Amino acid sequence: MITSCLPCRPGRESDARAFYQEILGIPEVVKPRQLAARGGYWFEAGALKVHLGVEKDFVPARKAHPAFVVDDLKGLSDEDARQIMGGNLSQLMGVEAAV
């Protein structure tokens, strides 16, 4: 099992859903009732579990980052992100673009 707990920028929850479900194809699952009150979202596919927590004082990560194996890497682009989410992948993930 691979579980990643990641922060989510407040106000970007619908973008996170679009990214994980529509772009990466990881379905959202219902959080256990006792944890649902905390907010955030869980996406799971087989052994992969991505848990997002909305953080009021969100600060983009400078070095930390998740890594995913995808079937069609060329199909993932900032243009796809703009069409689906009106943003770009690095903004959604909360990382600074590499210079």
Image: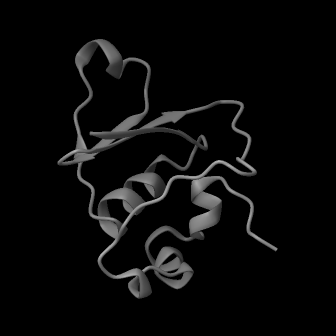
Farthest residue to the bottom: give it: 74
Q: Is residue 84 left or right of residue 71?
A: right
Task: Using the rendered view, name the quadrant where residue 43 is placed.
Answer: top left
Q: How many marks?
A: 0
Farthest residue to the right: give it: 99
x then y, percent, for residue 84:
43, 73
The quarter in which the C terminus is drawn is: bottom right
Farthest residue to the front: give it: 1
x then y, percent, for residue 66:
51, 53
Q: Residue at x 34, y 17 (%)?
A: 35
x then y, percent, for residue 89:
56, 67
The quarter in which the N terminus is drawn is: top left
Q: Residue at x 61, y 32 (%)?
A: 55
Q: Residue at x 38, y 17 (%)?
A: 37
Q: Nearer the viewer, residue 80 or 68?
A: 68
Q: Residue at x 73, y 68 (%)?
A: 97
| Colour theme | one colour
Farthest residue to the left: give it: 46
x then y, percent, for residue 20:
37, 57
Q: Is residue 43 left or right of residue 98?
A: left
Q: Is residue 54 left or right of residue 44?
A: right
On screen, 89 above or below 6? Answer: below
Task: Using the rendered view, name the quadrant where residue 88 is placed.
Answer: bottom right
Q: Is residue 2 left or right of residue 65?
A: left
Q: Nearer the viewer, residue 88 or 1?
A: 1
